[in-house]
Image (cartoon, grey):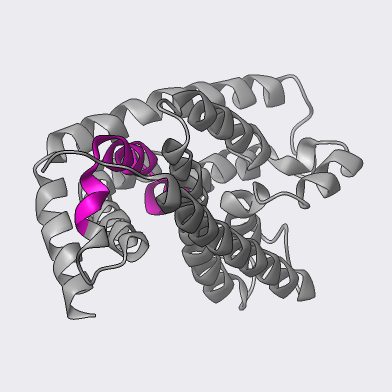
Amino acid sequence: MKKYWHVIGIGIQNNLTYRVNYLARTLFSFIPLFAMLSLWRTIYAGKEQGSALGGYTQAQMIFYYLLVAVVDVLTAVNEDDWQIAADIREGNISQFLLKPIDYLWYRLCLFFSGRIAFIAMASVPLAVFIFCFRDYVVWPAGGAALPAFVISLVLTALLQFFISYTMAMLAFWMLEISTFIFILFAFEYLASGHLFPLDLLPPVIGHALFFTPFPSMLYVPVAIYMGKIAGAAIWFRLLGQLLWLLLAYALARFAWRRGIKKYAAFGG
């Protein structure tokens, strides 16, 4: 276990060398967020005061996107899949076949170290952004909402990592996997609640999406915090997240075992 703590420490140091890049990425990520908030303000401006869309008032809709920004900073995968694919393509994983270290746990440690470094750099601009919209910020919807929200965040981060890791395993069979990564990102962006709350979809489509892992990758923690998922449904959705996480982990392990049989590296 000590070696993995060492990996996390080295990962944090390496990621902090890109702190300006992280800061710039955070600042520019607010541009589409401002655009979405302006769009929804325009939509609600044409409606009666206090009216709701999909169960969201204007204040709730704005707070929804604030929470999306927070969850994204805490859980999103940044370039891990590209780096894993590059390790496979360039033969860098050969060293992990000769050393007593598990490549999946090695990458997971780097993922968490990257999140720590990114949060350290993004916390100030994110705090300023939230302060500007402080009138819309509310406390968790109920007593169980906050601990359930924290648990859901952890499950969300792990699920995003294992799905990205599994996708990167395609590099064992294909030279270029960028198309598949972009397709996955597009589905995740639409079906996880990034673009709009899933409550706005027709009920049939909304329920059907929960048979996919995408809502568990963002919508579930946000909905738990806001009380859109409450009572016994909270634990049901957390169980759903856990099941998707276990499935993603199993697929990651399976893809590695199959891929390593096709792996070949030359030179020294």
Q: Nearer the viewer, residue 81 or 157?
A: 81
- The answer to whether residue 53 of the structure is visible from this angle is no
- The answer to whether residue 18 of the structure is visible from this angle is yes
Q: Nearer the viewer, residue 20 or 4?
A: 4
Which quarter of the figure has residue 229? Answer: bottom right
Viewed as shown, does residue 252 lie left or right of 187?
Answer: left
Determine the residue positioned at 78% across, 37% down: 200
Determine the residue positioned at 47% across, 65% down: 154
Determine the residue positioned at 50% across, 53% down: 258
Q: Which residues are magenta?
A: 69-95
Q: Position of residue 137 (x, y in %)?
A: 50, 51
Asked if the stretch drawn in magenta spans residue 91, the answer is yes
Viewed as shown, does residue 150 lie left or right of 224?
Answer: left
Q: Position of residue 41 (x, y in %)?
A: 61, 25
Determine the residue positioned at 75% across, 71% down: 236
Total marks in image: 0
Q: Position of residue 215 (x, y in %)?
A: 66, 49
Viewed as shown, does residue 138 lie left or right of 10?
Answer: right
Asked if the stretch drawn in magenta spans residue 89, the answer is yes
